[in-house]
Amino acid sequence: MSADVQERSVMVVGDRFEDFLTHPGTIAVSALLEFLRTGGGDGPPKITVGQGLTGEQLAELDKFADTGRCVLATQDRVPLPVERSVTHKVYEKNVLIGELERLGEGRYRTPLVLDERVEVLEDHLTGLHIPAVTLLEAARQTWTAVTERHLIGPEPRSRFVISHVNSTFLNFVFPIPAQLEYRLRSREQGPVGHVIAFTVEVQQSGRIAARFEAEIRVIPERFAEKQEAMAARQTLRDEIAPRPRATAMGR
């Protein structure tokens, strides 16, 4: 194990990606961390951080990199998950993106930071690639974080209502480094709140793997709660209201 780790750069991925770990040049995160904790080998291994690591495992690798126990082969730093509140998630394991980087006017980029325990993956893993539903959730978290951090203020508290999402899947996404890039297309003041249109692309190995073109309405929370409650009441009334009996023609 130690010789394999030190002979070349290795891609570290989550333990549950068992099929992907059969490929040469990969190592499970549990094996790598054990190697680093025991201080085996003559020099620091070169690693590339892939997908599937938990927040705790990423933080531990970050410390090893800071102290020179391992060397990052292709990345400037170990990608860590962004603060969960800006993605509207309760549990850190369900955060799928890292810190946002501003690329220009209305353009932002964030690394995909996939925890293998995430709700949209823990009961859905087919083949070697990351499922489409997981990428859609990562895109949603990206546009939510951009909107929260850069497009609206903290007051009044707002709700995001999706008007539409058009999804295009071009390539498989594997559990290796990937990024999401956000591009703002338009922002208009609506009758209540803002209407924001944008594109989020998932990129890996220099290729666009998936593209999401979407529009959301940003509505003050007090109005959104009232609208949702009214819609719920009306839908319930429509469902339980007596329906007229069909009559036979000619009677």
Image: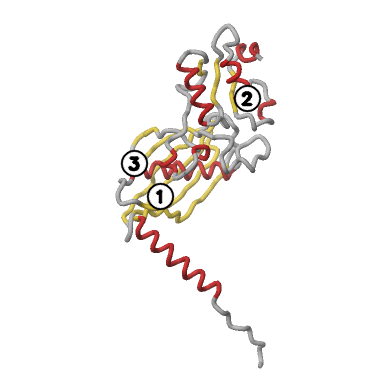
Disc number lying in front (2 or 3)? 2
Q: Amino acid at mark 1?
A: Ala
Is the residue under label 1 in contact with that under label 3 (CB below 8 Å)?
Answer: no
Could you give the CA–CA distance between mark 2 and mark 3, rounded to whole angstroms? 36 Å
Helix, strand or loop status at disc 3: helix
Is disc 3 surrounded by few (<14), some (14 to 19) or many (20+) residues within 10 Å? few
Q: Residue at x 66, y 27 (%)?
A: 21
Q: Amino acid at mark 3?
A: His
Position of residue 48 measured from the top left corner of the image (x, y, whole percent)? 54, 22
Tag 2 residue: 28
Disc number lying in front (3 or 1)? 3
Tag 1 residue: 197
Could you give the CA–CA distance between mark 3 and mark 1, rounded to whole angstroms? 14 Å
Position of residue 168 measured from the top left corner of the image (x, y, whole percent)? 55, 46
Between 137 and 123, the one nearer to me in the picture:
123
Between 169 and 239, the one nearer to me in the picture:
239
Is the residue under label 3 in contact with that under label 2 (CB below 8 Å)?
Answer: no
Disc number lying in front (2 or 1)? 2
Helix, strand or loop status at disc 2: strand
**Figure quadrant of the N terminus:** top right
**Figure quadrant of the C terminus:** bottom right
Q: Is residue 173 above or below residue 32?
A: below
Can you tell which quarter of the image residue 130 is in? top right
Which disc number belongs to residue 147?
Answer: none
User: Of the residues under marks 2 and 1, which one precedes in the sequence?
Assistant: 2
Which disc number belongs to residue 150?
Answer: 3
Helix, strand or loop status at disc 1: strand
Q: Is residue 40 above or below residue 81?
A: above
Q: Amino acid at mark 2?
A: Ala
Position of residue 151 measured from the top left corner of the image (x, y, whole percent)? 33, 44
